[in-house]
Amino acid sequence: MQGSESLARAAEREVREETGLIVTAEQVLYVEEFHNPETRYCKFWLKATWVGGTLSVDAPEATAEYIVDAAWHTEDQVKTLHVFPEILQGRYWEDRRAGFSAGPQYLGLREMAFW
């Protein structure tokens, strides 16, 4: 986040910078903590609505984050992919079908697989 930027505005900016998509952030879904030997991070996963832009990984911000591919996938397709966090292969879809009615969910603390 930059200066007085809200969590929602930061998410919208990050999506635009890293994917080329324009979204409106709506709701915090998950909070995840992770660490490596030097630091600890807290990541917020937000629900957003796509309002424009074209999906791309060509931006310098995407390259800096090692993003090499982006695509829209169905639930069945995601189950065949290596994705993280693992919640994206199961619980996310259940929560989505339920309308994310439980409010923000804490995913816990995990060790980073790479940094």
Image (spheres, grey):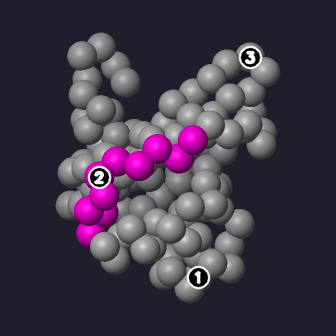
Quadrant for the N terminus in the image: top left
Residue lying at the far front in this picture: please name it: 102
Residue 111 vertical placement versus 16 (above, below): above
Which residue lies under the disc numbered 2?
103
- Residue 103 in view of the camera: yes
Left/right placement of residue 27 relative to residue 44 reads left
Looking at the image, which residue is at 50% across and 68% down? 91
Left/right placement of residue 92 relative to residue 104 reads right
Q: Nearer the viewer, residue 103 or 21?
A: 103
Which residue lies under the disc numbered 3?
38
State which quadrant residue 80 falls in.
bottom right
Secondary structure at numbered mark 1: helix
Residue 104 vertical placement versus 9 (above, below): below
Left/right placement of residue 44 relative to residue 76 reads left
- Residue 52 in view of the camera: no
Which residue lies under the disc numbered 1?
77
For badge 3, the amino acid type reads Glu
State which quadrant residue 81 falls in.
bottom right
Badge 3 density bin: few <14, some 14–19, many ≥20, Cα 10 Å:
few
For badge 2, the amino acid type reads Gly
Looking at the image, which residue is at 39% across and 68% down? 95
